[in-house]
Image (tube, grey):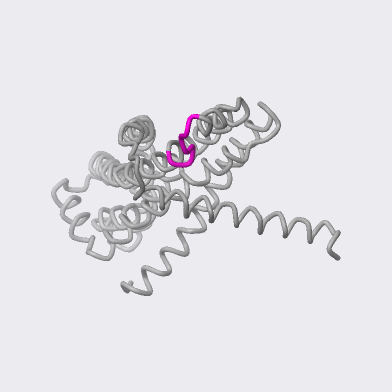
Amino acid sequence: MDDSPVAGWIKDQLLSLQDFTLLLARAFQNIFRRPFYYDDVLQQMDTIGVGSLPIVMLTGFFTGAVMALQLSATLAQYGQIERTGDLVSISLVRELGPVLSSLMVAGRNASGMASELGSMLVTEQLDAMRALGTDPMKKLVTPRLLATMIMNFFLTIVADICGIFGGFVYAVLAIGLDARQYWSSAFYALDFHDLVQGLTKPVFFGIIVALVGCYYGLKARGGTQGVGRATTQSVVTASLLVIVSDFVISRLLITFLGH
């Protein structure tokens, strides 16, 4: 039984979970330990946040436009087409904004982190850092974690705004809704619980994206081919965990906050 493929697979998954948990604990512990690499955090914020801004804006805009297109056709059957702004804003702020922006960040940055750290590992740059007395975990992982948490929060806000604006453009130009009515319904439909859900999720999603990318980068083996495999695995795993954790976080927030 111990030598069966299933038992070996389960053992590998448990060891991976243990390594990932240790990485998570050490990364957060290093936030409060000196030295503080502020310059590295700012550099990663620029790379992750500013670099991801165009794709997040485009994704948010066209997601909002498509939602207005689909929802208006359904609402028109019930004579409620003026509620298009309500549903677009609620859907974006609660779910689609955080999830889609995080998936874009995962696709662009988790792969970048994995390939960068994996290349440093296979070329023995991490060993050189340790020989010089620098902790690679604190120098490389913690700044990426902080930067992704912070920038994913603001990127989600940008995605929400662009999405609501995309819905507005379609609703006004194609449906003929009144602009003032659209914006008033879109904003009055949102309440405190919607904002809490929409702004809590990207912080957790940012943690997932950063740590998954760094984890696979630090576990890369087998030269350049290993780095390529780690890059692919990081994107797939980060995207999957974002979607799964979205359900878990939504369930918890609805339980504690209501609706």
Is residue 169 found inside the magenta-colored segment of the image?
Answer: no
- Say which residue appears at 41% left-offset and 64% top-offset: 250
Q: Is residue 258 left or right of residue 20?
A: left
| Stretch in magenta | 132-138
Q: Is residue 193 above or below residue 66?
A: below
Instruction: Report x, y in % for residue 186.
Output: 22, 54
Query: Can residue 76 be seen in the rendering of this structure?
Result: no
Q: Quadrant of residue 193?
A: bottom left
| Residue name at image x 34 percent, y 50 percent | 32
Q: Nearer the viewer, residue 147 or 15?
A: 15
**Closest to the observer, 10 or 247:** 10
Residue 63 in the image: above or below residue 53 = below
The percent coordinates of residue 163 (x first, y second) are: 31, 44
- Give the total number of marks visible in the rendering: 0
Front-lying residue, 40 or 213? 40
In the rendered image, which quarter contains the N terminus? bottom right
Figure check: 36 above or below 27: above
On the image, which quarter does residue 233 sit in?
top right
Placement of the C terminus among the 4 image quadrants: bottom left
**Residue 71 can be seen in this image:** yes
Q: Residue at x 41, y 44 (%)?
A: 145
